[in-house]
Amino acid sequence: MSASGVSVAAIAARLSAAGLPTRVEEHNRFTTVEAEVPETLSAETWREVLDVVADADRFGLMATSLNGRTLWAVVRKPVPMTGDVGGPGYQR
């Protein structure tokens, strides 16, 4: 497993341990971890959650009156150093 994969797994596990169910989505260049945040989250748990997502490359909180609050974190995947990096037909 890559370093970014380990980081994603750790973030998801720690958020789950804090009582926030998570979902992970793989994309070409990054992976996202999302968790629904209940209205009644204690200040101590908020501190713990913020400590967890600080390990991500980016994070934020989306809050709407329709869908509640969703915490998200993005971990970038490493750029390949070998292989067809330039794409088809790329020549040096």
Image (tube, helix red, strand yellow):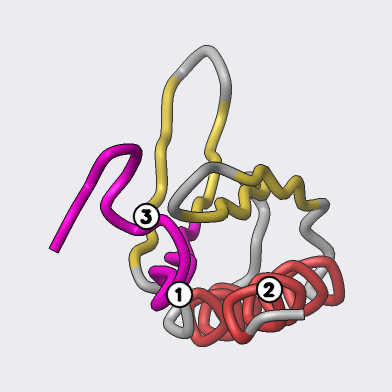
Indicate the quadrant containing the N terminus: top left, top right, bottom left or bottom right: bottom right
Please provide percent x and percent y for residue 5.
68, 73
2 or 42, which lies in front?
2
Q: Does the magenta stretch include residue 27?
A: no
Give the answer, above or below, for where 62 lies relative to 33: above
- Residue bearing mark 3: 60
Q: Is mark 1 on a helix, strand or loop?
A: loop
Distance of label 2 from label 3 (alpha carbons): 20 Å
Provide the residue span drawn in magenta. 73-92
Residue at 76 percent across and 73 percent down: it is 9
Disc on res. 56 = 1
Disc 2/disc 1 C-alpha distance (Å): 11 Å
The quadrant of the picture occupied by the C terminus is bottom left
Name the side, left or right, on which 67 lies relative to 78.
right
Q: Nearer the viewer, mark 2 or mark 1?
A: 2
Q: Position of residue 34 (x, y in %)?
A: 62, 48
Vertical comparison of 74 with 79: above or below: above
The amino acid on which the numbered mark 3 sits, given as a three-letter code, is Gly
Residue 5 badge: 2
Q: Position of residue 10 (x, y in %)?
A: 73, 81
